[in-house]
Amino acid sequence: MKKTILVLLILAVTNTFADDTPYNFIRFNSTARAAALGNAVVSIEDDASLIFFNPALLQSANEKTLSTTFSKHVLDINSGNIVYKINQFDLDGASLAAQINFNSYGALNYLDDEGKLYGNGFSGSDLSFGVTYSNELDSNWYYGVTGKFIYLTLESQSSSAFAVDAGMFYKVNDRTNIGLSLLHLGTEMSSLNGQAATLPVDARIGVNHRLKGLPLLINFSFHHLADEVDGFFDRFQNFAIGGELYLSKVINLRAGYDNQIRNYASADENKGLSGLSGGIGIKFEDVDFDYGYAEYGASIGLHRFSLALEL
């Protein structure tokens, strides 16, 4: 009897508009703040957790040393990330951080061709860990590079890859920033079941601006600019916008929109609020708490929770 494995993954929803590769999980790594802003965060300073989108942002990060995010999906699928800003070394003004990104798919079952259960107890997971270096290139210009190792497992199979993220960050003035990044450039070192795969390269560029008469930070970015599309201008449909309203020194309200999710991650007849997102940030002296929610369809939404600590 021919055996098949049924794997129920929430990433099947988000990966419908991505390249066909088992490494797509690194494209959907996010934090609660980033998710709430539609992931339009390639040019936001003062947040070390955003180095997953642009490693150059590490140089402008605030004093919070440890940032961690947890995301609860359907069934028993969980994911998250950790960023630790390393302050123990004298790097001549440079910044260094360690990062981890993971997905755990819980317990999965074996089914035959007729859908009958004949075994259980195997699992799957995704893991990447890396080191980020960031420094000042010139006045108000910053750069950053991340080297990361990626490891996937599914039942008895596994694969691995190495990738590099690179980015630039420019402070135009006290209220305006520009950022750009090229993510997941690398190569596979070993493959799942002998089937070679490529890494999902992602190019991003964005700008943000803090309004002068209103405590609002507006963020806009293009993302997935390296994707294969029918026409040159089609790639610019992958844009995101987010706003962060500062109600006080303690509380921030956030909202965002990702046009790519709206166009590709939900059926035309049942889009609902897909592409929209929102959340809240609460800042204390030593701890920051963030919550973000992103809608992927009429009945699918992801909740993310983040903490940033000063150790």
Image (cartoon, grey):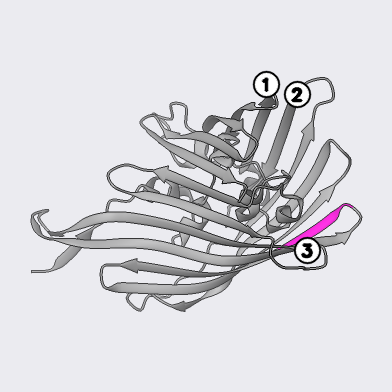
What kind of residue is marked 3?
Ala
Cβ atoms under marks 1 and 3 closer than 8 Å:
no
Asked whether residue 141 appears in the rendered view, the answer is yes
* Up-down relation of residue 35 to residue 80 (above or below): above
Between the residue at mark 2 and the residue at mark 1, the CA separation in whole angstroms equals 8 Å
Q: Foreground: 241 or 267?
A: 241
**Sequence-wise first label, 2 or 1:** 2
**Coordinates of residue 10 in the picture (x, y in percent):** 36, 47
- For numbered disc 2, what is the local secondary structure? loop
Three-letter residue code for mark 1:
Leu
Q: Which percent across, then down, holds residue 16?
A: 43, 49
Image-based side of 7 in relation to 118, left or right = right
Among the two numbered marks 2 and 3 on one chain, the one whose residue lies closer to the N terminus: 3
Residue holding disc 1 = 247
For residue 94, which numbered disc appears in the image? Answer: 3
Q: Is residue 21 visible?
A: no
Q: Where does the image place residue 260, in percent across and percent down from the top left?
A: 55, 41
Q: Secondary structure at mark 1?
A: loop
Q: Give the magenta-colored segment's residue range.
A: 140-144
Q: Disc 2 residue type?
A: Pro
